[in-house]
Image (cartoon, coloured by chain):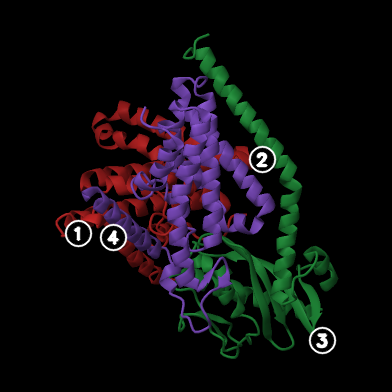
Chain colours: A green, B red, C purple
C-alpha cells in the first residue's frame, strides 16, 4: 500500500480522527464533574457578592447557610445586619447576547444592595466592561427612584452619589449600557413584586 | 434559549458599532496583506460576505441538529472548521462552473478565506450567544458587510498614505495598524447612532 | 535546509523573524483580550503549548501523512490540542475560561501554528521542531505581553489586578477600548523595525 493510494488516505485520516476524538472524549468525561461544580460555585459566588457577604471557605456551603430555599419565582431571602434582602438570578438581553447575573434588593429601604454579573457575551474593552468592579460597585446602596434607575453618560469613572438614581455607563458602549438599564429595571420590578407577595 | 434581540439590531451592530474586524480584531491576517489596492479589497470583501453568510447558516444547522442533540458540542471546533472548508470548496466549484468571469474576480480569494479567523469567529460567537437562525444569518451577513466596509475604507486610505512621507521604520504594517486604529476609533462613535428599541 | 541549531532558531523566532513584527501573523485571536494582562498570559501560554505540541506531532507523523490530506490532518492536530486547552481551562480556570470565551477556539485559525507546521516541522526532526514551536510562541507572547502591560497599566492603573497607581490616577479609558491595541501594536512595530533597519545599515 503506497502512501498516496486512495485506501491509505482514507484509512489514515479515519484512524487519526478516531484517536483524537477518543482522547477528547476521555478528557471531557474526566473533567465534566469539575465543570459542573465550577458552575454551581460561580452562581453561589454571584449571590454572595451581590448581597455583600465576604467569600470564605466553601462558597456552596456558605450559600446554603446564608440563603433560604428559593420561592416559586426563584427569589431567595436573607438577612444582612437585621435588614431583609431579596435576590434573584436574572437573564436579560445585552447588545450581543444574554447577560445573566444576580441583583439583590432591600425592599423596605427601596435600595439596591448589589449587582454581580455571571456571564455575558459583550465585546471585551467595550460592553464587556460591565463585569468590572467599578461598574458593579456603583449599584451598591443606590436608592431606587420612582421612575427607575438610569445608566447614564457621566463624568467617566464612577458615579458614587447613591441618592441620584443614576450610574455611569460604559464609554463607547451606549447600547450595552442602555441594555443594562432595561435589565436592571425589569429585575427591580420583578423583585419588588416578589418581595410584596411574601 | 436564544436571546430576544431583533435580527436588525444585530445586523446594524455588526456592521458598525461592533465591527468584527475593528472591535474583535478578527480577520486581520488577510486584511493587512490584501488592503493595498481597491480592486482586490473589493473582491475579498465580497467573498468574505458571501462565505460568512453561507457558513454561519450551515454551522448553525449542524450545531442545532447534530452537535446539540447528540451531545457533541465539545467537538465544535473541528466540526465548524470542516464545515467551513467544505463550504468554501463547494462554492469554489459552483462558481467555476456557473460563471468563469465571477470566478476570476472572486474565486482566487476563496482559498484565502478558509483560514480567515472571522469565519470561525462568527461561528463560535453565534454558538456562545445562542442565536436562533435569523439572528445567525443577520450576524453572519452583517459581519461580512462590516468587514467589507472596513477593508474598502482602509484600501482607500492606504492609497493616500502611500504618497505621504512616512518614516522608514513605520512604513508597511506599522502605518497600516495605526490607520486601522483611527478607523476603529471612528467606528466606536457609531454606537451613539442606534438606540435600542 | 538552512541552519537549524537551537540558538539560531531561538534568535530568529524571538527577533529577526518574529511572527508579529515581521510577518504580522496570528494577532486575530489574542489582540482582543490584551486589555487584561492575566488573560493575555493564559492565552499566549495556550498558543505556545499548541504550537509546540503541534510541531512535535506533525514532525513525528511527517512520513506517515499522505500529501493529499496534509492540511486537513494538520488542522485536525491543531484543533485537537486547542480543544484540550479549552477543556482544561474550563475545568481548572473557570474565570479565565469565561473571560476568554470564543477566543480560545480561535487559536485554531492562528496562522502562526499552521505556518510553523508547514514551514518547519514538516522538514525537521521532533526535538528541534518542538523548540521551534515553543520559541515561535514565545516571540508571539513577548510582543503581546508588552501590549497588555501597557494597556492594563494605563487603562486600569493595575497589573494582574493589583493596583499599581494610587487613587489619584485617572485611568485612560481609551487604553481599555479596542482601538488602542492597534495604536500600540503599530507603535511597537515602528520601534522594532527602526532598530532592525539601523542594525542593517551598520
Residue at the spot of label 4: B179
User: Which circle marks residue B69 in the picture?
Assistant: 2
Q: Is residue A88 left or right of residue B97?
A: right
Residue nearest the observer in this picture, C112 or B26: C112
Helix, strand or loop at mark 2: loop
Q: Is residue C102 above or below residue A160?
A: above
Q: Is residue B195 left or right of residue A61?
A: left
User: Which circle marks residue B166 in the picture?
Assistant: 1
Whichever of callouts 4 and 1 sits on the residue coming sooner in the sequence is: 1
Whichever of callouts 2 and 4 sits on the residue coming sooner in the sequence is: 2
Marks 2 and 1 on same chain? yes
Q: Are marks 4 and 1 in contact (CB under 8 Å)?
A: no
State how far apart marks 2 and 3 are (Cα). 48 Å
Task: Work out whether residue B64 can be spotted.
Answer: no
Q: Residue at x 56, y 42 (%)?
A: C82
Parent chain of label 2:
B
Number of the front mark, 2 or 3? 3
Marks 4 and 1 on same chain? yes
Instruction: Tell me if mark 4 has few (under 14), some (14-19) or many (20+) residues whose alpha carbon lies within 10 angstroms of its own.
Output: some
As drawn, the residue found furthest toward the front would be C202
Q: Can you tell which quarter of the image residue B110 is in?
A: top left
User: Which circle marks residue A82 in the picture?
Assistant: 3
Q: Is residue A197 above or below residue C102?
A: below
Helix, strand or loop at mark 4: helix
Whichever of callouts 2 and 1 sits on the residue coming sooner in the sequence is: 2
Parent chain of label 3:
A
State how far apart marks 4 and 1 are (Cα). 12 Å
State how far apart marks 2 and 1 are (Cα). 56 Å
Amino acid at each position: 500500500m503506497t502512501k498516496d493510494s486512495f485506501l491509505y488516505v482514507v484509512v489514515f485520516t479515519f484512524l487519526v480522527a478516531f484517536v483524537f476524538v477518543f482522547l477528547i472524549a476521555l478528557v471531557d468525561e474526566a473533567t465534566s464533574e469539575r465543570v459542573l461544580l465550577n458552575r454551581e460555585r460561580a452562581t453561589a459566588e454571584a449571590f454572595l457578592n451581590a448581597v455583600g457577604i465576604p467569600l470564605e471557605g466553601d462558597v456552596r456551603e456558605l450559600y446554603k447557610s446564608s440563603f433560604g430555599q428559593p420561592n416559586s419565582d426563584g427569589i431567595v431571602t436573607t438577612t444582612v445586619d437585621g435588614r431583609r434582602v431579596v435576590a434573584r438570578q436574572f437573564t436579560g438581553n445585552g447588545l450581543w447576547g444574554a447577560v445573566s447575573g444576580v441583583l439583590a434588593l432591600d425592599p423596605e429601604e427601596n435600595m439596591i444592595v448589589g449587582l454581580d454579573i455571571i456571564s455575558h457575551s459583550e465585546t471585551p474593552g467595550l460592553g464587556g466592561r460591565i463585569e468590572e468592579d467599578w461598574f458593579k460597585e456603583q449599584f451598591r446602596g443606590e436608592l431606587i427612584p420612582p421612575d427607575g434607575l438610569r445608566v447614564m453618560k457621566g463624568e467617566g469613572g464612577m458615579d458614587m452619589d447613591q441618592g441620584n438614581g443614576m450610574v455611569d455607563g460604559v464609554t463607547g458602549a451606549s447600547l450595552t449600557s442602555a441594555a443594562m438599564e432595561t435589565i436592571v429595571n425589569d429585575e427591580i420590578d420583578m423583585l419588588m413584586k416578589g418581595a410584596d407577595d411574601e | 434559549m436564544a436571546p430576544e434581540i431583533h435580527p436588525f439590531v444585530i445586523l446594524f451592530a455588526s456592521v458598525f458599532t461592533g465591527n468584527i474586524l475593528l472591535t474583535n480584531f478578527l480577520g486581520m491576517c488577510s486584511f493587512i496583506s490584501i488592503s493595498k489596492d481597491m480592486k482586490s479589497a473589493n473582491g475579498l470583501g465580497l467573498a468574505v460576505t458571501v462565505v460568512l453568510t453561507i457558513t454561519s447558516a450551515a454551522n448553525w444547522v449542524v450545531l442545532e441538529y447534530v452537535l446539540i442533540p447528540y451531545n457533541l458540542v465539545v467537538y465544535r471546533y473541528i466540526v465548524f472548521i470542516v464545515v467551513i472548508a467544505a463550504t468554501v470548496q463547494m462554492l469554489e466549484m459552483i462558481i467555476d462552473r456557473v460563471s468563469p468571469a465571477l470566478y476570476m474576480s472572486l474565486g482566487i480569494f476563496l482559498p484565502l478565506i478558509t483560514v480567515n479567523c472571522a469565519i470561525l469567529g462568527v461561528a463560535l460567537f453565534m454558538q456562545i450567544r445562542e442565536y436562533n437562525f435569523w439572528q445567525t444569518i443577520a450576524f453572519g451577513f452583517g459581519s461580512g458587510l462590516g468587514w467589507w466596509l472596513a477593508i474598502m475604507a482602509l484600501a482607500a486610505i492606504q492609497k493616500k498614505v502611500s504618497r505621504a512621507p512616512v518614516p522608514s521604520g513605520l512604513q508597511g504594517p506599522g502605518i497600516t495598524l495605526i490607520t486601522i486604529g483611527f478607523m476603529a476609533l471612528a467606528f466606536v462613535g457609531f454606537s451613539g447612532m442606534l438606540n435600542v428599541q | 535546509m538552512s541552519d537549524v541549531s537551537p540558538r539560531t532558531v531561538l534568535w530568529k523566532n524571538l527577533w529577526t523573524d518574529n511572527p508579529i513584527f515581521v510577518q504580522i501573523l496570528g494577532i486575530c485571536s489574542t489582540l482582543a483580550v490584551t486589555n487584561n494582562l492575566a488573560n493575555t498570559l493564559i492565552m499566549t501560554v495556550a498558543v505556545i503549548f499548541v504550537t509546540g505540541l503541534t510541531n512535535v506531532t506533525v514532525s513525528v507523523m511527517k512520513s506517515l501523512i499522505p500529501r493529499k490530506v496534509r492540511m486537513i490532518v494538520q488542522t485536525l492536530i491543531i484543533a485537537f490540542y486547542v480543544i484540550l486547552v479549552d477543556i482544561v481551562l474550563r475545568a481548572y480556570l473557570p474565570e479565565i475560561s469565561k473571560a476568554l470565551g470564543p477566543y480560545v477556539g480561535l487559536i485554531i485559525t492562528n496562522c502562526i501554528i499552521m505556518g510553523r507546521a508547514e514551514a518547519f516541522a514538516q522538514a525537521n526532526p521532533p526535538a528541534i521542531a518542538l523548540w521551534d514551536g515553543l520559541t515561535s510562541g514565545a516571540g508571539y507572547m513577548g510582543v503581546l505581553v508588552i501590549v497588555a502591560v501597557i494597556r492594563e497599566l494605563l487603562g486600569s492603573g493595575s497589573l494582574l489586578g493589583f493596583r499599581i497607581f494610587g487613587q489619584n490616577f485617572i485611568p485612560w479609558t481609551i487604553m481599555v477600548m479596542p482601538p488602542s491595541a492597534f495604536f500600540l501594536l503599530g507603535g511597537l512595530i515602528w520601534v522594532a523595525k527602526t532598530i532592525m533597519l539601523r542594525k542593517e545599515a551598520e
